[in-house]
Amino acid sequence: FSLGIAVIITVAFLMNAYGITSLIPIKGIAVPFLSYGGSSVLALSIAVGMVLMISKKVDLS
């Protein structure tokens, strides 16, 4: 789950970075935690909160 959230954030960031540098066409995906828009920021905040809760509850020993 944590890896999946990290991949989602990384892919969104890289698609925006490549679009800005004109390596690929701009897709219209919101930049993680930077774009103005409630649903994107809310969804990413909830996802990161879930990852933090999982890391708090898991016993690694």
Image (spheres, grey):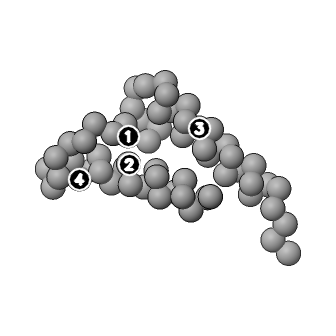
Q: Gap in Å between the C-alphas at discs 1 and 2? A: 6 Å
Q: Do labels 2 and 4 touch, CB within 8 Å? A: no
Residue at the location (28% across, 36% down)? 28
Residue hosting label 1:
31
Question: Circle 4: is it few (<14), some (14-19), or many (20+) Cα within 10 Å?
Answer: few
Q: In the picture shown, does residue 44 fall above or below 14?
A: above
Dot 3 or dot 4, earlier in sequence: 4
Q: Secondary structure at mark 4?
A: helix
Q: Which mark is residue 59?
A: none
Residue hosting label 3:
45
Residue 35, position as x, y percentages in the image: 39, 32
Residue hosting label 2:
12
Residue 2, position as x, y percentages in the image: 61, 58
Please name the amino acid that badge 2 sits on: Ala
Dot 2 or dot 3, earlier in sequence: 2
Q: Do labels 1 and 2 touch, CB within 8 Å? A: yes
Any part of residue 3 in sight: yes
Q: Is residue 30 left or right of residue 54?
A: left
Question: Circle 3: is it few (<14), some (14-19), or many (20+) Cα within 10 Å?
Answer: some
Residue at the location (38% across, 48% down)? 12
Please name the amino acid that badge 1 sits on: Val
Q: Gap in Å between the C-alphas at discs 2 and 3? A: 15 Å
Q: Do labels 3 and 1 touch, CB within 8 Å? A: no
Residue at the location (74% across, 57% down)? 55
